[in-house]
Amino acid sequence: MTTYQRILAQQTFDAPANYLSIHTIDMHTGGEPLRVILGGFPDLPGDNILAKRRYCQEHYDHLRTALMHEPRGHADMYGCLLVEPNDDEADFGILFLHNEGYSTMCGHATIAIAKLAVLMNWVDVVEGENVIKIDAPCGRLTAFVEVKAGEVVAVSFHCVPSFVVSLDAQVDVPGLGKVTYDLAYGGAFYAYVDLHKNQLDLDLSRESYSKLIAQGMAIKHAVMDSAQTIDHPFEHDLSFLYGTIFIGEATHEGVDSRNVCIFAEGEVDRCPTGSGVSGRMAIHHRRGEIAQGESMTIESIVDARFVGSVEEELTFGPYPAVIPKVVGNAYVTGQHTFLIDPQDPFRHGFFLR
């Protein structure tokens, strides 16, 4: 048998018993990656999703970095881990992973995992609307997957109550001067910076990628260091600023505006950011720019589109709030078995931008 014939005959690596094997299915939503961790990750004890999140942070963070960071991932990789839900009312629970740690909400992951649940028959799939309830760190999310002739044709979700903390707040940012922003929550807190209100040397194109990261992180840290209060009304674990979202003019006809989100440790969201769109629905509703039942189409840095709308008005703690709806789509890109060799000096990953 020639070497090439042996290559054709043996195409699976038989990992030694001391390797850790982690199985994933990879997807993207509007170009934003999602690595769905399914097998090989240790069980996480805890009575609820936030407790499981804390346990993962304290005991298995090296597995997050192994799967998100290089050489298995990259600076903008994103992932999720499926866990038991808080109670029998939900279908499953979810934790969100990225380059910095564990976010509280992720819309693009919610869209992707809802579609995957239908594709994998994790739920009893019916023709028409399939409702999937997901327990996330920020609370319970309800996703809707429309199936026609056995094919998924639409995916959307209702976010948790989303609200505005402040409008037209200002912060002094080193190197940028005074920046005006809105602070809102859509499952995570963001500082929203409208380019029309600020004299920033910036546009929302791919060519401005590095500048967007630098200015977005400068604004994020300036807001964090300011007197601005960032407190979730019920959960301390949710009380932190996740990122900066720049808002500008759309570049395509039929689109209302453009979002570019800089989050975690300088990650750039390829999609319009589901939690960010949720927070924007709260802002636009508060300003009287969108009514219940009306919608907006928002594009991303790579021209992916989400449609956001206001489904319900309510009160959440001290805040007038809304339940946003976000519509998008996701696609499977591959499935992997990642191996962690205990002798590999880079087994837990590294971060090099």
Image: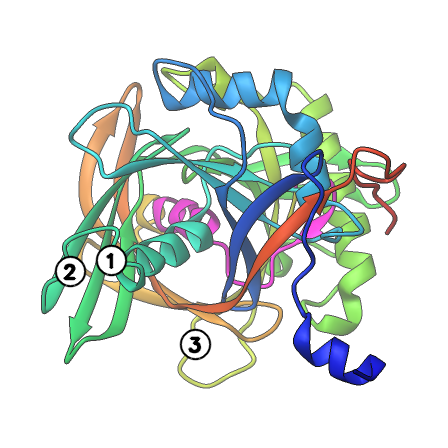
Q: Which mark is residue 12?
A: none
Callouts 3 and 1 close, C-beta under 8 Å: no
Residue at the disc numbered 2: 125
Q: Residue at x 54, y 38 (%)?
A: 40
State which tag comes first along the sequence, 3 or 1. Answer: 1
Q: Residue furthest front?
A: 1
Question: Is residue 225 located in the magenta-colored stretch of the structure?
Answer: no
Classify 198 as above or below 253.
Answer: above
Residue 272 percent across, percent down from the top left: 51, 61
Q: Is residue 9 above or below residue 133?
A: below
**Discs 3/1, front:** 1
Residue 255 marker: 3
Please state the extent of the stretch shown in magenta in the rendering: 264-283
Query: How many numbered marks does the figure carry?
Result: 3
Question: Could you say whether the residue bearing mark 3 is in a helix, strand or loop?
Answer: loop
Looking at this view, is 100 or 324 the one in front?
A: 100
Is 280 magenta? The answer is: yes
Residue shown at 29%/19% (left/top)?
Answer: 317
Three-letter amino acid code at the position of disc 2 = Val
104 left or right, relative to 132: right
